[in-house]
């Protein structure tokens, strides 16, 4: 039995990663249940055991402009500004994590072979497979979790891959800002359809479900509305 999603990440994910670090970017409006700017204790529950390190930033959340409004007309939540901002804030946070990783690689001259994207509201229900075992044969694909295990599992709840494809994955907000109205073949589009189309069309990177990755998003009852903190 577990008391939080972080406990399952600590128990089932971290031991399978080998030598690793954690990068976490949190944006806050400093409202109820939200941390203050700069309060790195917000990352404490996901801080890994040594020698792994936590690189944490807690910054003020700012409105992300809709750079390409034509694309947003066919967004699944086009009539919900909070839904638009929810996606943009997630993508911006992933980009900021990628920037922290790149800075650390430059400063330490030590690279990473793999990268894993984990939402803090993701709960694991079984040990994560050794990360190298997911990519035997040099696969450039990005693995996502067992969709059938969850009511709402999809390609945008988790990602694991070799470092370079994952860097493209983390920076896909740039592609959304510059996408044309006809770029997305599936409409109305959502986060997962954009992710699939963007990675395949621009970089030839496929997303593949791996049923060994037993993890689902678990939201508390107060998260009644999309993008609630």
Image: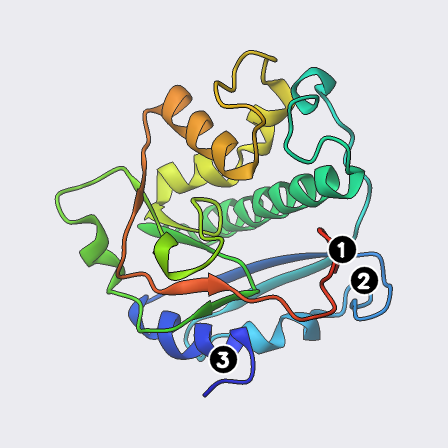
Cα separation between marks 2 and 1: 5 Å
State the mark number for residue 59.
1
Q: Which residue lies furthest to the front in this view?
A: 151
On the question of residue 110 being in view, the answer is no
Cα separation between marks 3 and 1: 24 Å
Give the residue at mark 3.
7
Left or right, 59 with respect to 188, comes to right
Left or right, 12 with respect to 184, comes to left
**Label 2 with label 1: CB-CB less than 8 Å:** yes
Give how far across and how far down residue 127 sits, in percent. Answer: 30, 73
Give the residue at mark 2.
37
Instruction: Please tell me whether residue 172 is drawn above or below residue 184 in the rendered image.
Output: below
Question: Which residue appears at 53% of the width and 36% of the height?
Answer: 171
Depth order, front residue of 32/73: 73
Depth order, front residue of 49/178: 178
Cα separation between marks 2 and 3: 24 Å
Question: Which residue appears at 63% of the width and 33% of the height?
Answer: 76
């Amino acid at each position: 039995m577990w008391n939080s999603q972080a406990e399952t990440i600590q128990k089932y994910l971290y031991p399978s990663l080998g030598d690793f670090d954690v990068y976490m970017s949190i944006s806050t409006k400093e409202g109820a249940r939200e941390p203050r700017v700069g309060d790195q204790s917000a990352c404490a529950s996901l801080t890994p055991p040594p020698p792994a390190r936590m690189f944490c930033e807690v910054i003020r959340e700012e409105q992300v402009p809709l750079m390409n409004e034509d694309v947003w007309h066919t967004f699944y939540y086009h009539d919900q500004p909070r839904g638009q901002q929810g996606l943009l804030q997630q993508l911006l946070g992933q980009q900021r994590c990628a920037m922290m990783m790149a800075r650390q690689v430059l400063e330490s001259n030590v690279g990473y072979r793999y990268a894993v994207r984990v939402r803090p509201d993701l709960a694991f229900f079984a040990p994560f497979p050794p990360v190298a075992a997911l990519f035997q044969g040099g696969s450039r694909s990005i693995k996502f979790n067992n969709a059938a295990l969850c009511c709402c599992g999809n390609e945008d709840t988790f990602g694991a891959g070799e470092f370079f494809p994952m860097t493209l994955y983390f920076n896909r907000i740039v592609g959304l800002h510059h996408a044309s109205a006809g770029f997305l073949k599936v409409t109305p589009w959502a986060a997962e359809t954009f992710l699939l189309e963007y990675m395949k069309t621009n970089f030839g990177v496929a997303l593949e479900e791996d049923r060994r990755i037993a993890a689902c998003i678990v939201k508390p009852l107060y998260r009644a509305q999309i993008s609630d903190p």
